[in-house]
């Protein structure tokens, strides 16, 4: 079985959407990535940090998905990373109300011995110096994928640009792609990001799907139109978990196979948004995942006769 190493936050989130409000629930980029990737036949591990306040039952949940947590440090007396965000009627835009780094502020990641030669690395949203430190501990993996967000662009620009220069794929949302590239057109933005180092760029556009760019080629996958979106939190990370989980399972990192990975990522993200936080991903069955893939195929297939 191929190995997927995941780096990212394991967190407490407080979320407000037009449909309800939660207090401190399980969240974090690595949590969503791990739950999503657990839909595939891969061996995965999360490198992260939590405080002593983090419930054991959340750790057990991740372990029950076959996720190795030996690289997830528990800091004695420390407080877990906390994020709170609010969505307005347009669920595509969110406001961060609070980010408390807590134990993340001084985190020095240690990659477990068993995961020092992973096949795929998913550097989830987290301090770029932590992302870089993890890369420095590895034998060159087949593929390194990085996700980030505006918070790190605003606060740690130079370190972020440095680590982006060392990865193969960047997954990022449309507004963040514009901020990173200083280009409005997403085509130009992707080309600029490719110039920074990565050979592939995935731009996530929420309910408007995702685009994959590589050397002048573009692939687009829509998001599945849903009756109801309840809470978009974690959709991007769930996408990343599906994208890398599928690539790790198949072991094929060609552009053609990355197109399928984009569809798998979009498919899994479509479940994530149906309930608050990680709730939907916790109960998701492989049968539901397969069924919805048929929906995806039907949505995008057409039969124009070209002469
Ligand atoms: P997404 O909706 O996919 O962009 O990711 C939401 C998750 O990202 C939440 O569960 C948060 O805990 C986590 N998060 C929010 N802000 C940050 C940040 N600055 N660094 C790392 N993770 C974050």
Image (spheres, helix red, strand yellow):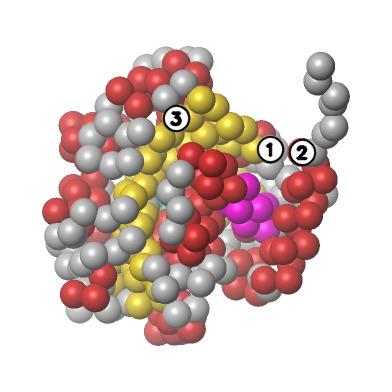
Q: Which mark is in front, 1 or 2?
A: 2
Tell me the magenta residue range: 263-271
> Could you tell me which quadrant the C terminus lies in?
top right
Q: Can see residue 226?
A: no
- Which callout, 2 or 3, points at the residue further toward the start of the chain? 3
Mark 2: few/some/many CA within 10 Å (<14, 14-19, 20+) = few
| Tag 2 residue | 300
Mark sitting on residue 214: 3
Can residue 47 be found in the magenta stretch?
Answer: no
Instruction: Please tell me which residue is depicted at 20% across the width and 78% down the height of the picture.
Output: 76
Look at the numbered discs 1 and 2 and tell me whether their residues touch, using CB distance below 8 Å. yes
Predominant secondary structure in magenta? helix
Query: SS of the residue at dot 1?
Result: loop
**Percent position of residue 16, x then y:** 59, 52
**Percent position of residue 170, x then y:** 38, 39
- Which callout, 1 or 3, points at the residue further toward the start of the chain? 3
């Amino acid at each position: 079985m191929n190995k997927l190493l995941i780096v990212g936050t394991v967190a407490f989130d407080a979320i407000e959407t037009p449909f309800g409000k939660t207090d401190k629930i399980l969240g974090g980029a690595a949590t969503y990535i791990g739950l999503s990737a657990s839909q595939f036949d891969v061996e995965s591990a999360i490198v992260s940090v939590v405080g002593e306040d983090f419930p054991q039952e959340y750790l057990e949940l991740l372990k029950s998905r076959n996720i190795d947590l030996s690289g997830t440090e528990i800091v004695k007396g420390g407080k877990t990373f906390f994020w709170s965000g609010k969505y307005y009627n347009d669920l595509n835009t969110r406001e961060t109300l609070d980010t408390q780094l807590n134990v993340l502020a001084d985190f020095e990641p240690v990659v477990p011995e068993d995961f020092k030669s992973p096949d795929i690395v998913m550097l989830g949203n987290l301090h770029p110096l932590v992302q870089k430190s993890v890369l420095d501990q590895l034998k060159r993996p087949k593929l390194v994928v990085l996700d980030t967000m505006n918070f790190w662009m605003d606060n740690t620009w130079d370190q972020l640009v440095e680590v982006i220069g060392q990865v193969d794929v960047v997954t990022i949302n449309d507004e963040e792609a514009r901020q990173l590239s200083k280009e409005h057109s997403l085509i130009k933005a992707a080309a600029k990001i490719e110039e920074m180092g990565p050979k592939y760029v995935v731009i996530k556009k929420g309910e408007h799907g995702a685009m994959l760019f590589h050397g002048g080629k573009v692939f687009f996958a829509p998001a599945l139109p849903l009756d109801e979106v309840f809470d978009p939190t974690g959709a991007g990370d769930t996408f990343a978990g599906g994208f890398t989980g599928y690539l790790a399972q198949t072991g094929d990192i060609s552009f053609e196979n990355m197109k399928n990975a984009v569809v798998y990522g979009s498919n899994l993200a479509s479940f994530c948004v149906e309930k608050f936080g990680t709730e939907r991903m916790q109960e998701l069955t492989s049968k539901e995942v397969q069924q919805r893939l048929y929906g995806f195929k039907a949505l995008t297939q057409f039969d124009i006769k070209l002469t």
